[in-house]
């Protein structure tokens, strides 16, 4: 079976790594980015450059959207210059950006009206996993679209989990990120308190990684940033508001991550000790 021609809109830090894996596995890949420098990096990696999202749609069978924010997802898909204005009815689109549940459901409806398949496909594990080709895709959509997507996603993902219908991929990613930031904020406070007692923090970290205090945030503390934390929690807030129920811990974490980004970048608890990386036993 002939491989889908793949387009990537937004080949940033993650998308660039993904397209390199696609090229390595023999896929024909085109890319578009409003940042000329980033687009040049994609071309250097062997991709064809497109002049607009519409051009991506015209020349690709399967399009991955990797832009940063939900309004950008809508902008590059809809409108006169959007992917959908140029894509044939047998194409498919995967939104790998973190977006709202209602947002991806709306986009799936718009795509369906044009006979285009839609995959709700946020990815997890971060930039290091993108480089290694070991990302986790949390996908929502029909079995047909999921199966069509597997040969593409398997080039840069070691795990693909079908969570259910469109929107459930975003729910899974949202819960994953929420728990990450809960642990991240707790590690700042726990680290500060532990340091005040004079305990050796890297030794404590190694002990915790053998106990119930273990977490991905603790293991990956050196690589962890709070760059997208506020955006993630704002998406969480939308979901909470839609449910019209109180989730006080989530509201508190949304406020704490605002300071968390600055603390982690400037003066974080030294869980690893002089920048070293503690190894899990």
Image: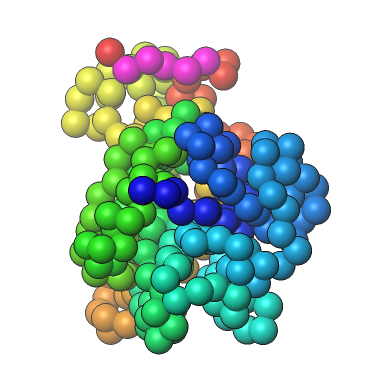
Residue at 67%, 38% in the rendered image: 46
On screen, residue 128 above or below 109:
above
Q: How is the image coloured?
A: rainbow
Q: Position of residue 266 (x, y in %)?
A: 65, 37
Give 46 or 193, whichever is nearer the viewer: 46
Residue 171 quadrant: bottom left
Q: Residue furthest right?
A: 36
Side of 60 relative to 81 (left or right):
left
Residue 279 is a magenta residue: yes
Tell me where the magenta segment starts and ends, as one range: 276-280
On screen, residue 73 above or below 249:
below
Residue at 29%, 46% in the rendered image: 160
Q: Quadrant of the C terminus?
A: top left
Report the number of numbered marks: 0
Q: Main secondary structure of the magenta part?
A: loop
Residue 208 is a magenta residue: no
Q: Position of residue 78 (x, y in %)?
A: 58, 80
Q: Residue furthest front?
A: 1
Side of 137 relative to 62 (left or right):
left
Answer yes or no: is residue 96 visible: yes
Residue at 58%, 55% in the rendered image: 8
Q: Position of residue 92 (x, y in %)?
A: 43, 66
Q: Position of residue 116 (x, y in %)?
A: 41, 74
Answer yes or no: is residue 196 visible: no
Give 36 or 242, whichever is nearer the viewer: 36
Residue at 27%, 30% in the rendered image: 214
């Amino acid at each position: 079976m002939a491989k889908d021609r793949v387009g990537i809109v937004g080949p940033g830090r993650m998308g660039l790594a993904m397209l390199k894996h696609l090229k390595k596995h023999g896929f024909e890949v085109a890319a578009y980015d409003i940042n000329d420098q980033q687009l040049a990096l994609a071309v250097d990696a062997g991709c064809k450059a497109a002049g607009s999202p519409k051009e991506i749609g015209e020349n690709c069978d399967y399009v991955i959207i990797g832009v940063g924010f939900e309004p950008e997802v809508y902008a590059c898909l809809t409108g006169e210059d959007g992917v959908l204005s140029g894509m044939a009815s047998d194409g498919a689109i995967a939104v790998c950006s973190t977006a709202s549940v209602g947002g991806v459901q709306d986009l799936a409806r718009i795509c369906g009206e044009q006979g285009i398949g839609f995959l709700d496909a946020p990815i997890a594990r971060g930039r290091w996993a993108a480089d290694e080709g070991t990302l986790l895709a949390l996908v929502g959509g029909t079995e047909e679209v999921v199966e069509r997507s597997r040969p593409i996603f398997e080039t840069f993902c070691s795990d693909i989990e079908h969570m259910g219908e469109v929107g459930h991929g975003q729910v899974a990613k949202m819960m994953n990120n929420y728990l990450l930031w809960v642990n991240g904020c707790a590690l700042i406070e726990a680290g500060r308190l532990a340091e005040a007692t004079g305990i050796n923090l890297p030794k404590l970290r190694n002990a915790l990684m053998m106990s119930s205090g273990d977490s991905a945030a603790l293991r990956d503390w050196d690589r962890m940033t709070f760059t997208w934390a506020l955006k993630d929690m704002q998406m969480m807030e939308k979901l909470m508001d839609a449910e019209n129920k109180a989730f006080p811990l989530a509201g508190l974490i949304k406020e704490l991550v605002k300071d968390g980004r600055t603390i982690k970048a400037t003066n974080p608890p030294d869980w690893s000790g002089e920048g070293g990386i503690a190894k899990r036993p």
